[in-house]
Amino acid sequence: MEKLCMMLMLMLCSAVMAMPVVLGIDESPKAVEEWFQNLSHRKEKLTKLHFYFHDIVSGKNPTAIHVAQANTTFTSPTLFGLVNMMDDALTVGPEPDSKIVGRAQGIYGSACLEDFGLLMTLNFVFTEGKHNGSTLSVLGRNSAFHEYREMPIVGGSGVFRVARGVATAKTIWFNLTTGDAVVEYQVMVLHY
Ligand SMILES: *[C@@H]1O[C@H](CO)[C@@H](O)[C@H](O)[C@H]1NC(C)=O
Ligand SMILES: *[C@@H]1O[C@H](CO)[C@@H](O)[C@H](O)[C@H]1NC(C)=O
Ligand SMILES: *[C@@H]1O[C@H](CO)[C@@H](O)[C@H](O)[C@H]1NC(C)=O
Ligand SMILES: *[C@@H]1O[C@H](CO)[C@@H](O)[C@H](O)[C@H]1NC(C)=O
């Protein structure tokens, strides 16, 4: 299975450009201002990312915890009002011990009265390779029982400054007893 899964990788679909290797990102206001001043000289590129998201809600070390609910949440067919905070591992492969390349940090909440629909507000925080220290921000709707869910990437930091794109999620493993899940993500992101 591991072999089938691609490493978190960067694909430059635009023309090959001579880019210096980014060794740590200067986040000072001056560096950010310079970066914006140079923006017109930069070419937008498309990067494709692929990883697995481990939503562990059970056991001694959950990475997603229930933080709030309404008094009507557990009588609602869609668990309306349930709010969870996550710091979920992002890995190269679907196995629980696969190499970690980042975290998904944020909140998901049950936001739909009629169907099961989650409001996702989170940052993908990358911790490996050329994306180490960079983030992507997701704000979208996750119909978690649908096969594919498309969520907007609304921004980013570091190598992903002023990024925009789309993340697609597909649940590949779900334990009904514990609620733990492994979700495959593909992210297509435009950035400079
Ligand atoms: C902006 O462009 C100038 C001239 O090409 C270059 O010297 C400088 O390093 C660039 N700054 C950034 C933040 O990329
Ligand atoms: C929920 O809480 C509100 C405010 O405390 C209360 O007025 C209401 O009766 C409660 N509803 C139920 C179903 O317990
Ligand atoms: C990622 O960046 C942090 C902070 O700069 C550094 O401590 C860490 O060693 C880096 N990790 C990798 C795998 O490069
Ligand atoms: C789901 O979790 C329960 C409790 O840990 C475990 O007994 C069961 O084997 C798990 N099911 C699957 C499909 O992994």
Image (spheres, rainbow, N blue to C red):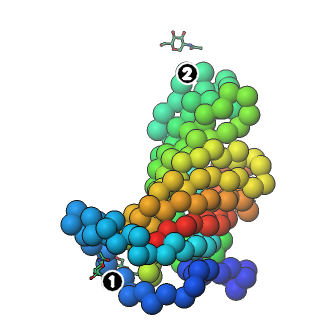
User: Residue 149 at what x, y percent from top left?
Assistant: 70, 52
9 sits to left or right of 26: right
Q: Is the CB atom of the residue marked by disc 1 within 8 angstroms of ligand 3's nearest atom?
A: no
Q: Which residue is mark 2?
A: 71
Tell me: residue 141, above or below residue 95. above
Residue 137: x percent and y percent?
Answer: 48, 56
Residue 158 in percent (x, y) is at 38, 69
Give the residue at x 67% y 59%.
Answer: 168
Q: Residues within 10 Å of mark 2 (few under 14, many from 20)?
A: few
> Three-letter amino acid code at disc 2?
Asn
> In the rendered view, would you say 47 is above or below 181?
below
Relative placement, left or right, of 68 versus 82 is: left
Query: Residue 32: image x %, image y %?
Result: 29, 66
Reading the image, the residue beneath label 1 is 23
Label 2 CB-ligand 2 distance < 8 A: yes
Image point 49% across, 75% down: which residue?
Answer: 43
Disc nearer the start of the sequence (1/2): 1
Quarter, ligand 3: bottom left
Q: Is residue 53 visible?
A: no
Q: In the figure, 148 relative to 191: above or below?
A: above
Image quadrant in which the N terminus is located: bottom right
Give me the residue at 44% from left, 61% from top: 162
